[in-house]
Image (cartoon, coloured by chain):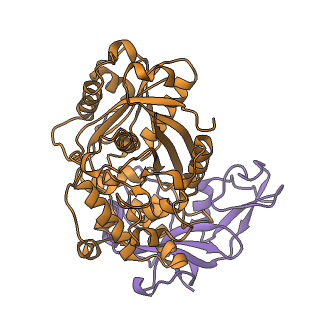
Chain colours: A purple, B orange
């Protein structure tokens, strides 16, 4: 049996680099934590397992950022949304492959990952971790 | 507690809010402190003040940490203990609460609570980056989120769920600018019209420039004492009769409820219960309008209207100076300005002025009970205090 990765933010983003969206499931109370945490915040058990997250979900809300942080200025305007995945958990991320005016609360979106053909990742300050990125796209 | 005074405010001071080139935070702090002293001749600061609690959000702004003793030093308060509290934009509401605890504990009779921030010397992009530190880093900042962007998402969710409109949000800005124009210490003392607000450039849809509060320099302080000894200092003390604070997830993204800020609501519930008052008893309130949608959300979270009806409350003009509840008579964060670490104290300062009939042109007639509602980050901290004329 392969060694279980620690339930950390870094592990989450390493999975993202492998094009996998993974959450932690508590073996004691069954709560799902996306992103994972070292202990379940519902019952504080550290007995957890990794589970794949359904890659599709519903757009709960969104915005279109016109005034961007320095590292994202070249991307502006860009859409950001909060997505609730079909089995559980929510994430915030950039929404690509859609005209911002076509965005609708409640629409179905899917997780998308950086591929080699994707334009360069926004430049981040040197001290920021170089985590792989996930995105959302219409599904 | 049941409405009993927790502590009394015997004097308060505030620097002018605005943009002050070449001035340091500690110098603004001295302006606030001397303002408070000058209004209270019976107070001997060096004899009477026994501890300082000062809120400040960011040491990045001036590359200056260790804010407690920095401020105590410049204000001539050494060697009393000095403590900085940090809770993002609610840093000095937390300082105020800490001061309440310190006096209620019996350890101190009289303390100073304060807040200070110097921001305008930094480029807007730097300020945006420093402020964003109050939201989640790995799953919000790293994904390109900004503070306006996160509040915009609350706004968009509110529009979808309750039919709230961009016009209703803009009306909050119009009202608060109208109030700010009557406040000689406000950063922007200029009225705006609805068309200006609606046609201003988009920062983060649906929020436009005029939906956003100001980057401001400022400082504010209040002197708290035991209620039994307040009359030694002034004939017109103001009592704090309720206080509440709550925490929520650091990230907005994982919350079930995206249309309200539960920490503010829970803090309000706690403060109302302690003060033994109801929302309808509040005559004047300073609420956290860092963005116009946040004021609409605050109306609902504080029970000034039903959930989802915050937009109607502003549209019906019920939160102006002559309204059902006068909200942000100071001009709010929107027009008075938002020196983040000073905001919580400055909200209490305005309510103190209102309850002691010192609010000049913006005075709410017969104001007796007031409330402050201060939010840190994207509602990860909520603080509510309730004040009553003694």
Based on the displayed image, in which of its 4 quarters is residue A122 positioned? bottom left
Residue B39 shows in the view? yes
Which residue: 24% across, 76% down? B195
Based on the displayed image, in which of its 4 quarters is residue A27 positioned? bottom right
Could you tell me residue B286's position as x and y percent? 41, 50
Name the residue nearer the viewer: B256 or A77. B256
Which residue: 21% across, 63% down? B191
Report the label total: 0
Name the residue nearer the viewer: B125 or B176. B176
Residue A114 shows in the view? no
Q: In the rendered view of the protein, which quadrant contains the C terminus of chain A?
A: bottom right
Could you tell me residue B329's position as x and y percent? 33, 53
Could you tell me residue B214's position as x and y percent? 29, 55
**Seen from this angle, which residue lies furthest right?**
A28
Q: Is residue B340 above or below residue A87?
A: above
Q: Is residue B192 above or below residue A103?
A: above
Which residue: 45% across, 40% down? B93
Based on the displayed image, in which of its 4 quarters is residue A54 positioned? bottom right
Q: Is residue A80 above or below residue B237?
A: below
Which residue: 56% across, 77% down? A59
């Amino acid at each position: 049996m392969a060694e279980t990765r620690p339930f950390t933010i870094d592990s989450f983003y390493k999975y993202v680099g492998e094009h996998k969206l993974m959450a932690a499931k508590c073996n004691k109370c069954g709560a799902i934590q996306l992103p994972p945490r070292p202990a379940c915040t519902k019952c504080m058990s550290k007995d957890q397992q990794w589970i794949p997250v359904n890659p599709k979900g519903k757009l709960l809300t969104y915005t279109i950022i016109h005034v961007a942080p320095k590292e994202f200025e070249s991307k502006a305007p860009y859409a950001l949304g909060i997505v609730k995945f079909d089995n559980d958990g929510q994430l915030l991320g950039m929404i690509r492959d859609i005209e911002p005016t076509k965005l609708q609360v409640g629409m179905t979106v899917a997780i998308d990952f950086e591929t080699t053909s994707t334009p360069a990742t926004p430049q981040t300050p040197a001290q920021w971790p170089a985590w792989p990125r996930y995105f959302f796209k219409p599904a | 507690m049941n409405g009993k005074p927790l502590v009394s405010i015997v004097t308060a001071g505030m620097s002018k809010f605005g943009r002050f080139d070449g001035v340091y935070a500690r110098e603004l702090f001295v302006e606030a402190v001397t303002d408070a002293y000058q209004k209270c001749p019976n107070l001997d600061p060096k004899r009477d003040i026994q501890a300082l609690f000062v809120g400040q959000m960011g040491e990045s702004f001036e590359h200056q940490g260790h804010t407690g003793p920095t401020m105590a030093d410049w204000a001539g308060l050494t060697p009393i203990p000095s403590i900085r509290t940090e809770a993002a934009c609610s840093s000095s509401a937390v300082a105020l609460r800490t001061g309440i605890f310190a006096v209620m504990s019996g350890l101190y009779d009289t303390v100073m609570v304060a807040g200070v921030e110097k921001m305008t010397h930094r480029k807007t992009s730097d300020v945006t980056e420093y402020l964003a530190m109050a939201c989640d880093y790995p799953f919000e900042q790293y994904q390109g989120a900004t503070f306006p962007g996160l509040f915009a998402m609350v706004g968009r969710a509110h529009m979808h769920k309750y039919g709230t409109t961009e016009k209703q949000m803009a009306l909050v800005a119009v009202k608060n600018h109208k109030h700010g124009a009557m406040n000689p210490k406000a950063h922007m003392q200029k009225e705006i019209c609805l068309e200006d607000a609606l046609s201003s450039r988009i920062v983060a849809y649906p929020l436009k420039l005029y939906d956003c509060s100001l980057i401001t320099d400022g400082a504010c302080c209040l002197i708290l004492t035991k209620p039994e000894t307040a009359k030694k200092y002034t004939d017109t003390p103001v009592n704090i009769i309720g206080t509440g604070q709550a925490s929520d997830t650091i990230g907005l993204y994982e919350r079930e409820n995206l249309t309200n800020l539960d920490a503010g609501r829970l803090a309000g519930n706690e403060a109302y219960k302690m003060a033994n008052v109801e929302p309808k008893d509040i005559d004047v309130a300073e609420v956290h309008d860092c963005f116009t949608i946040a004021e609409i959300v605050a109306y609902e979270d504080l029970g000034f209207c039903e959930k989802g009806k915050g937009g109607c409350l502003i549209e019906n003009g019920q939160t102006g100076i002559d309204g059902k509840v006068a909200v942000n008579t100071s001009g709010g964060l929107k027009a008075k300005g938002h020196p983040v670490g000073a905001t919580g104290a400055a909200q209490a300062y305005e309510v103190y002025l209102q309850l002691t009939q010192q609010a000049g042109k913006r005075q709410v007639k017969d104001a007796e009970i007031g409330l402050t509602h201060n939010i840190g980050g994207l509602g990860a901290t909520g603080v509510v205090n309730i004040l009553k004329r003694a």
